[in-house]
Every structure is written in structure tokens, then in C-alpha cells.
């Protein structure tokens, strides 16, 4: 399949249904899309000393280790350079990293320190005996990593940083996490998020709050703004109608940052199978008094409505009579942008795409 989406939305056709159904493309997306993008993996507060995790478990499943050392937070491979054992099995505090298999030791920067019974080994130790350092960045209390970044972190998150600065939240309180499982392809879930076209047809309660919608598109992200006629359901800095009710920021390929007057809902879309996706919800509250108001008042209900329609699309695209669709130039600009990024990443092997 040739991945090509016309740059002009009025001429463009959507991705072929083959992309969502074929196991081949699902596997290819691991290296071509997800290994080359930035992934949110933790909050800064979670990393006390050593925090192991599997990056996108059930998909990339790469063992990584977040380390807080004298210079801050870094990310290392969590695999011993001797025989490949996982080094740190659970979060802990330690002055060094020691393999429980044969005793190989590393400092908290990943540098090889010592190894029993290796006297006489030629060209040892070498740089290959150190733990691989994985690109790691921070933004507004969140930690991000990328296995093989195709583009710089600022190009990925520059616009999001401006939103955090505008809101000026200093005391976001983490109040809980929850996972949802959707019987649909990860990209179908993202596409649904990327347009408000369906709101009047799918979300009756949300439609009563949202009076208007606008979109902005950046290199690797897009921003949807929802407006309301209700002052009490808007941000404090929104003084004139229509009032700003929500900011929906999507960062390619799988991160959703939903800013509401009450705080932030983070949704991480995690592929499991071509027809199964895990959605991890993280909730951070700035103003509890606004939790029951506006566009962010009943997120579980909205999620259930979204899941139902996305799962229906997953069934529908298996039809012998469907392959591609067309875009609404006024309503589906962000979906078109998302498809063009998928086509770009799936078409390029290992070369950088930042300036293409």
C-alpha cells in the first residue's frame, strides 16, 4: 500500500481501511511511528530514585529505567549488557545499579563499574558495556522519552508549553488513574478525538454545553478549542462570549491533553492489537469546585459514547464495500493532518522527518 494523503483537504481521501486491519502495518508502526516519537511515561514526582517500566507495554514493550541522580532525571536501558537480564524489577532507592544474575554493576549514569570473573577479557570494558542512554525530557512536571526521536522535543511540544504557561497552574493535584479498553484500532480512536463534527450526533449532553469549535494545526500537534455560552463553565481568563470551555491538545501519535477549567485530563492511547487499544486516563485537578461543570463534567459518559461509535467503525471498515472516505474541509482538518503524519512516518525508513 502506498501511503499518500493529498496535502489539500478538498482533494484528499482518507487512509485505506487496509491500514487499520492488516497486522503487517500494525507491526511496522511500532518502529516507524511509536519508537520515533515522544512518549509520556511518568510524572516527575513518581521518580524518587530508580523507576523501571516497559515503554508502551503490550506493544513496544521496551524495558527502560528512569533514574533520578545528581543531575536530575535521566532514562537508561533496563537490560544488563552482559546477558540481557532485566536489571531493576521494581521501584527502589539505590546508590548503584546491580544485576542480580551475575553481579555486573553500573553507576546511576549507566556507566559500567565492575564485573566478577572477567579478568583477561580483551577490549573490556568498552562503551558497549555501558547502559544505553535514552533521550529524556521534561515539561510541566511530566517526563517524556523517545527511543529513536525523529524530531526534537521542542518541535513536538513547543505549542503545548505555551498553553501550560498561559494557564499558570502551580498546584495541579493528581487524583487518580483509570484504563479503558476499546475494541478498535488505535488510530480510529485518535481520529474520533480529532474532530468535534460528531458531537451533536453522539454526545447529547456535551452538545448542550459546547456552542462553537475552532482548530489550529502545528507541525506535530493540533489544538481544538471548545466554546460555551455559559460563563461559569469557562476558564477564568475567558471574559467575553463565546467563552472558552476546553482546550483539546493532540500530540502525534497518541497523546491527548485535555485542559478544562477544573484541571487536566491526560489520555495516552496505547496500541495492543490491530483491533484493541488501551486508553490510560490520568486526572489532575486545579479547582475542585468546577469538576461538575462544563465540557469536562462527565468524562466517563463521553468516553463510553466515543467507544461505542469507534468500535462500530472498526466493524464497518471490514466491509468489502468500504476502503476510503473523504474529509469535511470545515470539520475534519485535524483528522486530515493526522493522516498525513501517519503517511509521512510510515513512508520513511530511518531518516529524520523534522524538516521534510
Image (cartoon, rainbow, N blue to C red):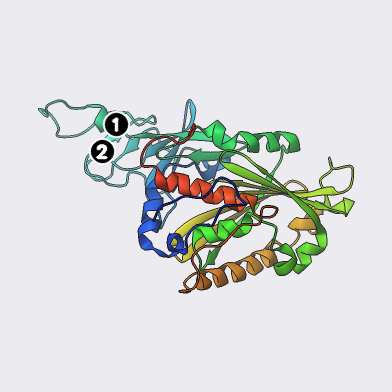
Residue at horizontal 35 percent and vertical 30 percent from the top: 107
Q: Total label count?
A: 2
Q: Position of residue 200 (x, y in %)?
A: 75, 65
278, 124: nearer the viewer = 278
Vertical arrangement, residue 252 with respect to residue 270, above or below: above
Q: What label sits on residue 130 in the rendered view?
A: 1
Specify whether 287 is left or right of 325: right
Residue occupying the point 35% across, 31% down: 110
239 to 268, vertically: above or below:
above
Tell me, yes or no, whether the two marked residues, 2 and 1, touch with CB atoms within 8 Å: yes
Report how far apart the C-alphas of labels 2 and 1 lie in the structure: 7 Å
Q: Residue 341: horizontal and vertical position, in percent?
A: 51, 46
Labels 2 and 1: the sequence-earlier one: 2
- Using the rendered view, name the quadrant where residue 163 is placed: top right
Numbered disc 1: secondary structure: loop
Relative height, residue 191 to residue 317 (above, below): above
Please name the residue that numbered disc 2 is placed on. Answer: 81
User: What SS does tag 2 mark?
Assistant: loop
Amino acid at each position: 500500500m502506498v501511503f499518500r494523503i493529498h496535502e489539500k483537504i478538498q482533494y484528499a481521501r482518507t487512509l485505506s481501511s487496509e491500514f487499520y486491519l492488516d497486522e503487517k502495518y500494525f507491526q511496522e508502526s511500532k518502529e516507524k511511528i511509536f519508537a520515533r516519537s515522544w512518549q509520556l511515561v511518568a510524572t516527575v514526582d513518581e521518580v524518587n530514585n530508580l523507576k523501571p517500566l516497559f515503554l508502551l507495554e503490550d506493544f513496544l514493550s521496551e524495558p527502560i529505567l528512569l533514574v533520578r541522580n545528581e543531575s536530575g532525571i535521566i532514562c537508561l536501558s533496563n537490560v544488563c549488557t552482559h546477558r540481557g537480564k532485566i536489571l531493576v524489577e521494581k521501584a527502589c532507592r539505590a546508590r548503584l545499579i546491580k544485576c542480580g544474575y551475575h553481579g555486573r554493576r553500573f553507576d546511576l549514569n549507566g556507566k559500567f563499574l565492575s564485573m566478577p570473573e572477567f579478568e583477561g577479557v580483551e577490549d573490556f570494558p568498552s562503551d558497549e558495556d555501558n547502559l544505553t542512554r535514552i533521550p529524556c525530557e521534561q515539561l510541566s512536571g511530566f517526563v517524556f522519552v523517545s527511543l529513536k526521536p525523529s524530531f526534537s522535543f521542542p518541535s513536538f511540544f513547543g505549542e503545548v508549553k505555551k498553553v501550560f504557561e498561559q494557564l499558570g497552574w502551580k498546584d495541579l493535584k493528581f487524583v487518580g488513574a483509570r484504563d479503558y479498553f476499546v475494541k478498535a484500532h488505535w488510530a480510529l480512536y485518535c481520529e474520533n478525538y480529532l474532530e468535534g463534527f460528531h458531537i451533536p450526533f453522539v454526545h447529547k449532553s456535551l452538545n448542550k454545553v459546547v456552542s462553537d469549535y475552532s482548530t489550529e494545526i502545528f507541525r506535530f500537534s493540533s489544538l481544538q478549542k471548545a466554546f460555551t455560552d455559559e460563563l461559569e463553565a469557562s476558564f477564568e481568563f475567558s471574559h467575553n462570549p463565546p467563552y472558552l470551555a476546553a482546550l483539546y491538545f493532540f500530540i502525534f501519535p497518541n497523546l491527548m491533553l485535555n485542559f478544562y477549567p477544573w484541571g487536566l485530563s491526560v489520555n495516552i492511547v496505547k496500541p495492543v492489537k490491530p483491533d484493541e487499544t488501551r486508553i490510560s486516563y490520568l486526572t489532575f485537578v486545579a479547582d475542585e469546585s468546577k469538576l461538575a461543570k462544563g465540557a469536562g463534567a462527565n468524562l466517563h459518559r463521553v468516553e463510553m459514547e466515543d467507544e461505542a461509535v469507534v468500535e462500530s467503525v472498526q466493524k464497518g471498515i471490514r466491509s468489502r464495500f468500504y476502503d476510503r472516505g473523504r474529509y469535511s474541509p470545515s470539520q475534519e482538518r485535524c483528522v486530515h493532518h493526522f493522516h498525513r503524519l501517519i503517511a509521512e512516518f510510515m513512508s520513511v525508513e530511518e531518516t529524520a522527518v523534522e524538516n521534510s
